[in-house]
């Protein structure tokens, strides 16, 4: 941040390069916001009338204004929001916690770096695996080798729709594919923690487990914020696993992204206002998280 | 309390296919209640030695005995030792009280009120009772230092290990803490092993000092013994500031011959040196005298190159004419002396050290007289 | 003071230096069998190895099963003829699926598209990101606001951004065509024209991720000491020269890590393409390996064929990650 004095003098001397700088910054900002703004105004328009007779980035004129698209989208997506939250929240918490534990065991615990390095390479590689490479085995695993819907038949007997097994499968799947990034994020944090501090605690008589509990965990709070936010965004936004494990948007267990991907599609064409309203509703939790914890999110993606 | 013995302690690090010997066959016995300072240049293996005693590094070979236990294989937490780290390693999320209680809670079954009482007693002892509910980040460097010490003391261990605990303090605070730490150790009577690279700390604090170089133990002795009767050239050069002057010489019947000058040897030194050919003549700067006129074979004409006035004394760099050899002398601060002046330097025969030119071992050390001992700088 | 010490010491003498829980190994004259195994493992792997197992093992088991186990299994499936609703037959393994894939023109064009998308998207995003980072780094006001807005699209789901761009690229009413119309160009059928659709997708993805590249570069720029800027100024370099010759070369590390992440995002662009059309078949001309694989497996039920394509995709990812891991290892980051 520049100090105010410098800024003031820059402004008073009408520095051309400064004007150009802010002009460029604002132009990029407009470019970034245009698709979102166009989506927002469109979501309040009637279709097809409002869509075709007003400019896409102009607000709706009163005659074409409607809230019906939002209520329709909310009706369609409400169930999906709940479903998504049902697996996204626990999966986020579990994968962050497992990642923290693993990162601790791989950094502050004293064992030979020669053996740690290949394990770490596996973790880092695990982040970058294209999920397509595991999809077929994944669906076979859940269908044939871990038939949760048979194991949990007592739940269905209680009147819970057996489609909800998909939620549980998604939860476990997201934990499994989320732990590598969580581990790496926590590792970079723990690596910069004072080794002497942990050694001191060991000399003080604390076991590895106690050191985690009393020293590392309390000091990890800032990193937990980063990891939880990043992880939640990733899991909430995912479509691929939802598509493969739940498959149809008509399923009662369909996550929000799955429903949104097929929203407003009909023979006559796409109902854009409905889709835009749906997009905003689906994006609401991640947007809220982003607005509240933008700093942590930036830190998460940068590392 | 107990004595600590290191017996042929060796540490070999694997660096790829290379083996690096960090600590090589170090044997030293630290008496019950003794304050031993381990000193040496960086990379000499002093910290590794300390970390092996703490159990933070594995022992390649040799034994560590604490009292009647061999603790080589013990886990750090079972060794009954406390360590003060260079960075203090205070737990930032805990208050001073929690920092100090931590060790007692983790390593003993002591009831809470007793832990509390002991922490408060120790805090009183360290003069930090007013800081008990603060966090480390709210403390000054000196206060953090005290907390780190207090955290070690409260556990009442058999041995204190200290790894350059004063090096993060500014110069004034450091000399203050030096005295305080020394008095505290004396009062508590806990066997202490103290690692530093600072030879002032070594000289002033230790009952004895152990000097390490290249992983090998060079000498273990009282500070004054190391100063006046160094076991070898390394110790002679390492202890003392400015360091001892060295001249490479050749031994010839009754005298030493060098590039710059010849030095006639008195009979008893001649006897001790005889048999060697290449030797090193050593003389401490404060033993060099500047005299008015040449009087005998131990006086040499020199030119003043640089004078560094320190106030109480001057450090004078003298050059032998027509050679590159220099001689450093410390003289009285009142002595008026200017650069390029021609003077006569006397190297008194009772103050010289002679070392073997190849092994570096001391062949002859200076004679120590009470009067000389009294002039050793103390702080 | 002496009194305190004496009481302190008296209280200490009867203390038993026992330990807390049972997890600490105690050295006893005759260690039991488990203790011996423990010691042996400790000697081999390091003192904390056994104690640290419960911390990292769950993660590794999970990852071993779901990531690495699944990849090997996938490889196995790709060697079978598994399709439809029957069970895979693991007794008859051959490379038939790969032979088929290499002669399948749609796989070849999907590979080309994947490659083009990867390169174009990564380069464009890095360039824009670097430019933004330099702008934001020039001591601007409201820096946080600008940064937050630039990174905003990254927090959105591919499914969501696909909706926005579907509307942006709309032939009749889309913002893009209307803006082009103002300067007398277009309209262009962005998603319907085979020769432009891929670039339209690249642009949309760049919109979403240039903020990410900016954040990475900004961190890199902030790590460069101010002295370097000042020294370059004193040496008489113009602003442009200063960045080009002094600053940008120091951003090598940021460039490498950002490109790896961006390429992996590009390989995963499936979600975006699927959502554009609400189906398995993306707009003609924008089919990539990721979409082709899912379509073959889940739409056509050609499981083995899909797996083979997945392995090709994996090989592509590996050729990016492998060198990156070696690079990180050399720099001592592993």
Image (tube, coloured by chain):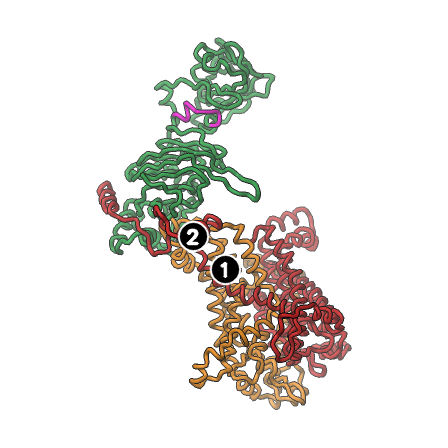
Chain colours: A orange, B green, C red
| Parent chain of label 1 | A
Point out which mark residue C90 bears.
none
Judged by its main secondary structure, the magenta piece is helix
Point out which mark residue C38 bears.
2
Residue shown at the point (50%, 33%) measured from the top left: B214
Is residue A81 or residue B335 the one in the foreground? A81
Specify few, some or many for label 1: CA neighbours under 10 Å numbering under 14, 14-19, or 20 or more: many
Relative to B181, residue B362 above or below: above
Classify residue A166 as left or right of residue B101. right
- Residue C318 occupies quadrant: bottom right
Relative image position of residue B100 (x, y in whole percent): 33, 51
Q: Which residues are magenta?
A: B225-234
Classify residue B52 as left or right of residue A286. left
Relative image position of residue B117 (x, y in whole percent): 25, 51
Is residue A142 or residue C171 the one in the foreground? A142
Q: Is residue B232 magenta?
A: yes
Residue shown at the point (34%, 47%) measured from the top left: C28
- Residue A44 occupies quadrant: bottom right
């Amino acid at each position: 941040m520049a100090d105010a004095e410098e800024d003031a003098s820059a402004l008073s001397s009408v520095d051309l390069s400064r004007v150009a700088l802010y002009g460029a910054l604002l132009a990029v900002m407009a470019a970034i916001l245009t698709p979102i703004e166009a989506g927002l105004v469109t979501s309040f328009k009637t279709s097809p009338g409002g869509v075709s007779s007003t400019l896409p980035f102009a607000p709706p004129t009163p005659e074409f204004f409607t809230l019906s698209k939002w209520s329709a989208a909310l009706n369609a997506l409400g169930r999906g929001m709940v479903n998504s939250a049902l697996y996204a929240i626990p999966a986020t918490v579990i994968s962050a916690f497992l990642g923290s534990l693993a990162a601790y065991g791989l950094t502050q615990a004293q064992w030979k770096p020669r053996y740690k390095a290949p394990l770490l390479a596996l973790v880092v590689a695990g982040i970058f695996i294209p999920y397509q490479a595991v999809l077929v085995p994944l669906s076979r695993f859940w269908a044939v080798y871990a038939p949760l819907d048979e194991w949990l038949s007592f739940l269905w007997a209680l009147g819970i729709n057996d489609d909800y097994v998909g939620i549980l499968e998604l939860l476990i799947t997201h934990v499994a594919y989320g732990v590598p990034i969580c581990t790496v994020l926590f590792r970079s944090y723990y690596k910069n923690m004072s080794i002497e501090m942990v050694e001191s605690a060991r000399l003080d008589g604390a076991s590895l487990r106690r050191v985690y509990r009393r020293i590392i965990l309390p000091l990890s709070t800032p990193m937990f914020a980063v990891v939880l936010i990043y992880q939640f965004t990733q899991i909430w936004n995912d479509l691929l696993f939802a598509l493969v494990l739940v498959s149809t948007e008509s399923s009662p267990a369909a996550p929000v992204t799955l429903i949104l991907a097929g929203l407003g599609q009909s023979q006559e064409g796409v109902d854009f206002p409905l889709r835009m309203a749906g997009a905003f509703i689906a994006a609401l939790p991640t947007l809220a998280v982003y607005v509240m914890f933008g700093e942590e999110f930036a830190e998460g993606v940068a590392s | 309390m107990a004595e600590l013995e290191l017996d042929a302690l060796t540490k070999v690090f694997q660096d790829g296919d290379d083996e690096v010997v960090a600590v090589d066959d170090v044997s030293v016995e630290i008496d019950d209640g003794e304050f031993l300072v381990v000193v040496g240049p960086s990379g000499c293996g002093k910290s590794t030695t300390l970390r092996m005693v703490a159990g933070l590094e594995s022992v390649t070979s040799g034994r560590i005995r604490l009292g009647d236990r061999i603790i080589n294989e013990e886990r750090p937490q079972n060794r009954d030792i406390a360590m003060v780290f260079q960075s203090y390693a205070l737990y930032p999320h805990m208050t001073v009280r929690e920092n100090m209680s931590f060790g007692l809670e983790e390593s003993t079954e002591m009831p809470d009120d007793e832990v509390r009482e002991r922490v408060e007693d120790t805090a009183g002892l360290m003069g930090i009772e007013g800081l008990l509910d603060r966090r480390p980040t709210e403390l000054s460097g000196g206060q953090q230092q005290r907390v780190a010490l207090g955290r070690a003391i409260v556990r009442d261990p058999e041995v204190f290990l200290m790894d350059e605990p004063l090096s993060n303090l500014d110069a004034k605070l450091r000399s203050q803490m030096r005295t305080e730490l020394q008095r505290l150790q004396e009062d508590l009577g806990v066997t202490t092993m103290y690692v530093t690279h600072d030879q002032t700390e070594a000289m002033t604090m230790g009952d004895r000092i152990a000097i390490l170089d290249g992983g090998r133990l060079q000498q273990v002795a009282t500070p004054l013994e190391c100063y006046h009767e160094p076991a070898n050239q390394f110790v002679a050069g390492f202890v003392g500031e400015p360091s001892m002057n060295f001249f490479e010489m050749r031994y010839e019947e009754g005298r030493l011959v060098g590039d710059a000058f010849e030095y006639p040897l008195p009979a008893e030194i001649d006897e001790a040196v005889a048999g060697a050919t290449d030797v090193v003549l050593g003389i401490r700067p404060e033993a060099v005298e500047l005299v008015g006129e040449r009087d005998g074979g131990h006086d040499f004409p020199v030119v003043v190159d640089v004078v560094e006035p320190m106030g109480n004394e001057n450090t004078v760099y003298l050059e032998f004419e027509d050679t590159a050899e220099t001689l450093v002398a410390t003289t009285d601060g009142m002595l008026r002396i200017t650069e390029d002046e021609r003077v006569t330097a006397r190297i008194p025969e009772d103050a010289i050290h002679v070392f073997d030119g190849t092994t570096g071992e001391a062949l002859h050390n200076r004679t120590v007289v009470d009067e000389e001992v009294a002039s050793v700088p103390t702080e | 003071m002496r009194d305190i010490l004496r009481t302190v010491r008296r209280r200490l003498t009867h203390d038993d230096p026992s330990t807390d829980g049972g997890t600490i190994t105690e050295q006893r004259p005759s260690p039991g069998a488990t203790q011996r195994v423990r010691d042996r493992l400790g000697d081999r792997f390091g003192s904390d190895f056994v104690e640290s197992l419960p911390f990292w093992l769950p993660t590794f088991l999970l990852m071993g099963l779901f990531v690495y186990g699944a990849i090997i299994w996938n490889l196995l499936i790709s060697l079978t003829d598994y399709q439809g609703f029957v069970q895979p037959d693991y007794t008859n393994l051959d490379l038939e699926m790969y032979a088929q894939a290499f002669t399948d023109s749609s796989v070849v064009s999907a590979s080309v598209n994947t490659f083009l998308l990867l390169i174009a998207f990564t380069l464009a995003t890095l360039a824009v990101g670097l430019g933004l980072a330099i702008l934001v780094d020039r001591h601007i006001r409201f820096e946080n606001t600008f940064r937050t807005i630039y990174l905003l699209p990254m927090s959105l789901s591919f499914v969501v951004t696909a909706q926005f761009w579907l509307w942006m690229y709309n032939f009749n009413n889309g913002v893009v065509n209307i803006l082009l119309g103002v300067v007398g160009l277009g309209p262009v059928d962005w998603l319907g024209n085979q020769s432009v659709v891929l670039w339209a997708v690249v642009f949309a993805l760049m919109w979403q991720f240039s903020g990410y590249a900016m954040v990475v570069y900004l961190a890199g720029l902030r790590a460069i000491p101010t002295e370097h800027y000042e020294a370059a100024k004193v040496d008489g370099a113009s602003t442009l020269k200063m960045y080009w010759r002094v600053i940008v070369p120091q951003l090598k590390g940021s460039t490498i890590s950002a490109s790896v992440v961006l390429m992996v995002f590009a390989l995963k662009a499936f979600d975006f393409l699927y959502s554009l059309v609400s189906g398995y078949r993306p707009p003609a001309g924008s089919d990539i390996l990721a979409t082709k694989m899912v379509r073959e497996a889940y739409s056509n039920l050609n499981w083995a064929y899909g797996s083979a394509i997945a392995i090709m995709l994996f090989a592509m990812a590996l050729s990016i990650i492998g060198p990156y891991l070696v690079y990180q290892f050399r720099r001592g980051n592993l």
